[in-house]
Image (cartoon, rainbow, N blue to C red):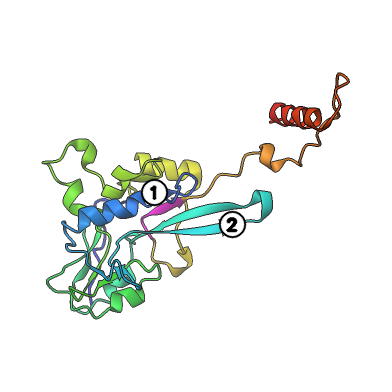
C-alpha cells in the first residue's frame, strides 16, 4: 500500500462557486481537450456517436433541482478529484501508482505502474476516478500539472484549463494551505464547505454555497389588471390597459 507524505508545502486546489456555475460544460470540455494531449493522455471514448456513448472524463457537471415552486432553483454541481489531504485512493493502491505529491499536494496516477485494478475507484467516495477502457488504467484530474508549471505559457494561462475556460468565473485556483491566499479568503468570506466531511478524507477543493434567492417580481403574487380608465370600453381597450398595467408593474 502507498504511504502519504507527512506534510505538503502547498495545498493546491479549486474553489467552485455553486452560485455562479451555469452548467455550460465549458470546464468539462476544456479539461477533456487539454488532458487528452497532456499528462493523462489519451482520454479515450467508446462509441461516442453510438447508442451507449461513454469514456474518460476527468471533470463532470451534474444538475439538481433544489426547492419547490417560486423558491426552487437549479444547482449545477461540477465534480472532479478533490485532492484530499488523506486520500483513501492513495493508501489503498497496491503498486504505488496512486500518490500524493509533497511539494504541492496534488494527487496523481503514474500510468507506468497502474495495473487497472480499480481499488482506488472503489475507495474514493466522490466518484472521481475514471477507468480508461482502451488504456486499461485509472485516470483522474491532475490540476493540469503539466500546465500550471509550464514556463512556455503566458502567466495568465498557468492555471487549470477548467478555470481558464469558465465564462462566469465560478472556478478559482490557488493554495488553500495559505490562509492569506485569494482562494482561502474567498472560502472564509463565503462560508465554503467540504464535500462529505464525515468521511474524514479532508478534501482540499472547496465549494461555495448558492446565495439566497433575491426577492423579485417572480416571487410576488400575480397582479390583478386594473379596470379601464378614461372611459375606454371594449375588449381591445381592456387588453391594452391590462398590458400597460403589467409593463408598469414589473
Q: Residue at x 86, y 29 (%)?
A: 227
Task: From the top left corner, tell me how far across and down residue 140 is, in percent.
Answer: 27, 64
Task: From the top left corner, tell me how far across and down residue 4 is, in percent.
Answer: 25, 67
Magenta stretch encompasses residue 206 = yes
Instruction: Examine the rendered structure and indicate whether residue 134 appears above or below residue 101.
Output: below
Whether residue 131 is visible here, answered yes or no, is yes
Secondary structure beneath label 2: strand
Q: Residue at x 11, y 41 (%)?
A: 152
Q: Which residue bears the numbered disc 2?
A: 66
Quadrant in the picture for the N terminus: bottom left
Q: Main secondary structure of the magenta part?
A: loop
Secondary structure beneath label 1: strand
Side (left or right) of 34 relative to 52 = left
Q: Residue at x 44, y 47 (%)?
A: 21
Q: Which residue bears the numbered disc 1?
A: 15
Instruction: Examine the rendered structure and indicate whether residue 175 appears above or below residue 63.
Output: above
Q: Which residues are magenta?
A: 203-207
Quadrant in the picture for the C terminus: top right
Circle 2 residues within 10 Å: few <14, some 14–19, many ≥20: few
Magenta stretch encompasses residue 127 = no
Side (left or right) of 17 relative to 57 = right
User: Residue 179 sits in which quadrant?
Assistant: top left
Nearest the viewer among 134 and 107 is 134
Amino acid at each position: 500500500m502507498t504511504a502519504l507524505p507527512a506534510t505538503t508545502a502547498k495545498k493546491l486546489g479549486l474553489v467552485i462557486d455553486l452560485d455562479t456555475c451555469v452548467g455550460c460544460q465549458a470546464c468539462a470540455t476544456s479539461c477533456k481537450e487539454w488532458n487528452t494531449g497532456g499528462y493523462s493522455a489519451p482520454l479515450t471514448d467508446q462509441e461516442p456517436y453510438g447508442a451507449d456513448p461513454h469514456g474518460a472524463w476527468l471533470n463532470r457537471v451534474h444538475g439538481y433541482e433544489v426547492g419547490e415552486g417560486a423558491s426552487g432553483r437549479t444547482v449545477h454541481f461540477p465534480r472532479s478529484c478533490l485532492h484530499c489531504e488523506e486520500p483513501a485512493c492513495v493508501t489503498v493502491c497496491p503498486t504505488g501508482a496512486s500518490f500524493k505529491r509533497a511539494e504541492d499536494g496534488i494527487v496523481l496516477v503514474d500510468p507506468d505502474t497502474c495495473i487497472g485494478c480499480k481499488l482506488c475507484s472503489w475507495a474514493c467516495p466522490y466518484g472521481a476516478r475514471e477507468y480508461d477502457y482502451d488504456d486499461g488504467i485509472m485516470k483522474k484530474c491532475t490540476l493540469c500539472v503539466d500546465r500550471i508549471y509550464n514556463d512556455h505559457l503566458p502567466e495568465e494561462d498557468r492555471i487549470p484549463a477548467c478555470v481558464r475556460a469558465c465564462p462566469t468565473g465560478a472556478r478559482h485556483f490557488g493554495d488553500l494551505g495559505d490562509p492569506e491566499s485569494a482562494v482561502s479568503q474567498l472560502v472564509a468570506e463565503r462560508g465554503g464547505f467540504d464535500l462529505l466531511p464525515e468521511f474524514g478524507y479532508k478534501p482540499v477543493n472547496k465549494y461555495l454555497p448558492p446565495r439566497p434567492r433575491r426577492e423579485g417580481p417572480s416571487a410576488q403574487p400575480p397582479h390583478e389588471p386594473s379596470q379601464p380608465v378614461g372611459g375606454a370600453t371594449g375588449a381591445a381597450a381592456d387588453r391594452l390597459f391590462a398590458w400597460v398595467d403589467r409593463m408598469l408593474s414589473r
